[in-house]
Amino acid sequence: MENILQTLPGTVDTYFAGQLGDQAIAGIGVTNLVVNLFISFYTAFSVGAGVVTARAFGRGDREAVGQALSHALVLGGVIGLGCGLICLALARPILRLSGAEGDVIACALPYFLVVAVPSAVLCLQLILSSGLRTMKDTKSPMYSTLLGIWGWAGCWPSPAPTKWGTW
């Protein structure tokens, strides 16, 4: 369920881009292709980190649990930051490599920079979620993902006490 929620923003963005035209839909689609590759890679990394954490947790070795999560978060942050910097520096070539041309790149570039560049946050969230699940806390990761989507959707309370969000 959590993985479905992680891809939901891209799906909803595609729906709303439909109001803007074919080029916008194509731009969102190309960006989602890249982001979904990141999600797959980061998920595989978080599963590996979860295995190491679960083994330490099963042994009752709290120190090893902390070390495993710390190392995974540092390495995940470095990998995520590296991927984000690559996306920042090579956004146009990545979009071209994904099959985008001309107007599609023009539509995709701002969205790509907002969604793909800060992917380090996604990597860290996946590692933390995996770590919590391996320590028998299956609800917190789901709530964290829902909270992230809630914020992405612009549903934070506004300053006026009777209004919610930007919609």
Image (spheres, rainbow, N blue to C red):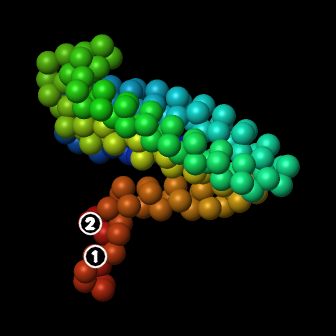
Residue 80 placement, left or right of 88: right
- The secondary element bearing badge 2 is classed as loop
Amino acid type at image mark 2: Thr
Mark 2 residue crowding within 10 angstroms, few (<14) / some (14–19) / many (20+)? few
Residue at 47% from the left image edge and 62% from the top image edge: 147
Is the Cβ of the residue at disc 1 closer than 8 Å to that at disc 2? yes
Report, in whole angstroms, how far the alpha carbon at label 1 lies from the one at label 2. Answer: 8 Å
**Can you identify the residue that label 1 sits on?**
158
Please state the horizontal and vertical placement of residue 96, each as a whole percent of the image.
25, 15
Q: Nearer the viewer, residue 68 or 157?
A: 68
Residue 125 placement, left or right of 12: right
Tell me which numbered mark, 1 or 2, is placed earlier along the sequence. Answer: 1
Please state the horizontal and vertical placement of residue 115, each as a whole percent of the image.
32, 40
- The quadrant in which the C terminus is found is bottom left
**What is the quadrant of residue 136 in the picture?**
bottom right
Q: Give the numbered dot on residue 166.
A: 2
Mark 1 residue crowding within 10 angstroms, few (<14) / some (14–19) / many (20+)? few
**What is the quadrant of residue 153 in the picture?**
bottom left
| Residue extending farthest bottom | 161
- The secondary element bearing badge 1 is classed as loop
Please state the horizontal and vertical placement of residue 58, each as a whole percent of the image.
84, 49
Residue at 37% from the left image edge and 31% from the top image edge: 82
